[in-house]
Image: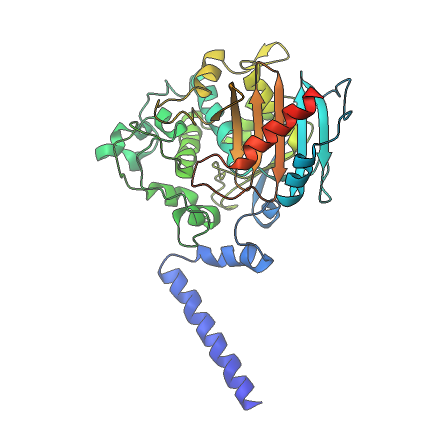
Amino acid sequence: MKFLKKTLKFIAILLAIVIAALYITDTDYLLKAVRTIYLTGHSTAYLEDYKKFDNQAIAASDNPQPWPNHKAYNSVEATDDLKSANTDWKSIAYVIIKNDSVWFEEYYDGFNEDSKTNSFSMAKSYVSGLMFKAIQDGYIKSIDQPVCDFLPAFCDGKAAKMTVGDLSSMSSGTNWDEAYYSPLSITTRAYFDDDLAKVMNGLKMDTDPGKSYKYASGDTQMLAMVIEKASGKKLYDYFESSFWKPLGSENETLWQVDSEDNDLVKAYCCIASNAKDFARYGKLFKDHGKWNGKQILDSTFVAKSIKPRFPESPEYGYGWWLKKQFGKDFFMMRGHLGQYVIVQPEDNVIIVRLGHKKSPDAGVGVFTNDISLYIEEAYKMMEK
């Protein structure tokens, strides 16, 4: 019994020392990481982790507009390869929207058409759109306006040359390190820290901004801070009034914030919604910024978003991923673990896939094989 008491006392002292060290070294965010992710059996963020964080609610549309079912709705089964992929990579939703009607939809693992799951980096496409909306509304002069006009931490040296458009096109030049699985990376800190603005304002410059593409979630987070400062609105409110409600979204959604006190959205990720409401934003861009005949976003902004800024980086525009397949141009929203809204405008096709896993990583920002498969199998099904 004495040995047990001594052991427990030692463990308690050790834990106290570890916790104190985390606070002293400003890595106490790891406590939240352990509590919300690692102790739940996960090694990284997961689809329903939004339940463990603070969120702000974004209301459903006052005029919800359900997607109509196509005349050939669910008339074709998933291909064998698609079935295998959905099993192996643990899909929870696979939806094909053809000619603005739901042509095929299936849900898995106990999820349904209204289930909320984490968008992860698909949120970046929304934030980039909000930047263009802020320009359209007169809050921001243009994509060439300096970030320094809004964020004083980026007014010195190379940072003074950084523009709002650099943030949207992932060319800030900062030292952000996109490392999802390292507990000590700034990406992990940003996900769990309760003062996200402090984390962002501590970024340093690596290279001249606006010269080349480097995928960095921090760019989108800074962009959100710019939009909030420029508009005087919380990003989740601006998102609700600009896109979520006008696009007829059927469900309330949630956007994670760093904490109740600071109330800054995790702009680079973390909108909890469902496949068919996510798909609405793809339709908006497919239709050149129009929704039911109303111009929500200027068509010139849409066109700019889905063209590469840098010729040597044809895979990225302003907040959207760009991919060629079958000789066709696809643009897509893309998130951690394989969350996708994939659009082919000429064919009037939108493919949505949500799930727990994706095919093995090929490196930060590189298209994984699962994306090609989801496109290829959708087209095989539609050709039957």
Which residue sits at x=37%, y=41%?
Answer: 200
Residue most extreme to the top: 293
* Location of residue 353 (image quadrant): top right
Q: Nearer the viewer, residue 307 or 28?
A: 307
Q: Position of residue 344 (x, y in %)?
A: 57, 19
Residue 210 against residue 256 in the figure, above or below: above
Which residue sits at x=39%, y=47%?
Answer: 186
Which residue sits at x=25%, y=32%?
Answer: 208
Q: Is residue 334 visible?
A: yes
Residue most extreme to the bottom: 2
Q: Position of residue 342 (x, y in %)?
A: 57, 26
Q: Is residue 113 visible?
A: no
Q: Nearer the viewer, residue 34 or 182?
A: 182
* Location of residue 375 (image quadrant): top right
Which residue sits at x=50%, y=41%?
Answer: 263
Where, quadrant-wise, is the C terminus in this rendering? top right
Q: Nearer the viewer, residue 98 or 45?
A: 98
* Location of residue 105 (image quadrant): top right
Q: Position of residue 283 (x, y in %)?
A: 60, 20
Q: Nearer the viewer, residue 107 or 231?
A: 107
Residue 289 against residue 9 in the figure, above or below: above
